[in-house]
Image: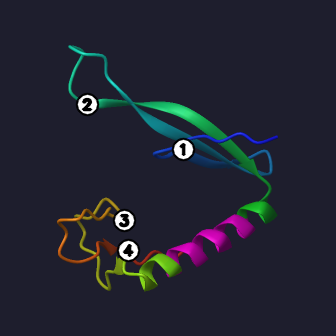
Amino acid sequence: MNKNSHVDGVEHIAFAGNAVRISFFALQAAPAGEGDGAAREESASLVLSPEAFLRTRAAFNQMFDELISKGVFKENAKPTQDEDLAVKETTESDAEPPAVADHKLN
């Protein structure tokens, strides 16, 4: 089975029933005249065993390190209290790569 889903982010993540359950969202454009913003709509979900979650986390960490080394992101040694995003996207007009907060899991 080959199914591709577009996602813009994680809507919710939880551990229940001995599995990590992740709901993703995609942004949907509002119909003309119904507002300026895009609405979030659940687009996919993923259920992982704890072992599969650890393997997936390792793969994401490896990709994150690669993106840092390529300059897509830069590490922010001391994130401010006001930062509510861990990662900011770059645009062509950005003078330097975005900062990312240093997160540690307990």
Q: What secondary structure is found at the residue carrying circle 3?
A: loop
Name the residue nearer the viewer: 41 or 66.
66
Give me the residue at 37% from left, 80% from top: 71
Instruction: Give the residue type that dot 2 points to.
Output: Gly
Instruction: Give the residue type that dot 3 points to.
Output: Val
Which quarter of the image is occupied by the C terminus? bottom right
| Foreground label between 3 and 4 | 4
Earlier-in-chain disc, 3 versus 1: 1
Relative image position of residue 8 (x, y in whole percent): 46, 45
Q: Which residue is mark 2?
A: 37
Relative image position of residue 72 (x, y in whole percent): 37, 74
Badge number at residue 50 = none
Q: What secondary structure is found at the residue carrying circle 1?
A: strand
Badge number at residue 87 = 3
The magenta stretch is 54-65
Q: Is residue 34 above or below residue 74?
A: above
Earlier-in-chain disc, 3 versus 4: 4
| Foreground label between 3 and 1 | 3
- Specify whether residue 55 is painted magenta: yes
Instruction: Give the residue type that dot 4 points to.
Output: Val
Q: Which residue is mark 1?
A: 12
Q: Is residue 99 above or below residue 11?
A: below
Q: Within 10 Å of the Cα at label 3, are there few (<14), some (14-19), or many (20+) other Cα atoms? A: some
How far is the residue under mark 4 from the one under mark 2?
27 Å
Earlier-in-chain disc, 4 versus 2: 2
- Specify whether residue 11 is painted magenta: no
Q: What secondary structure is found at the residue carrying circle 4?
A: loop
How far is the residue under mark 2 from the one under mark 1?
21 Å
Q: Which residue is mark 4?
A: 72
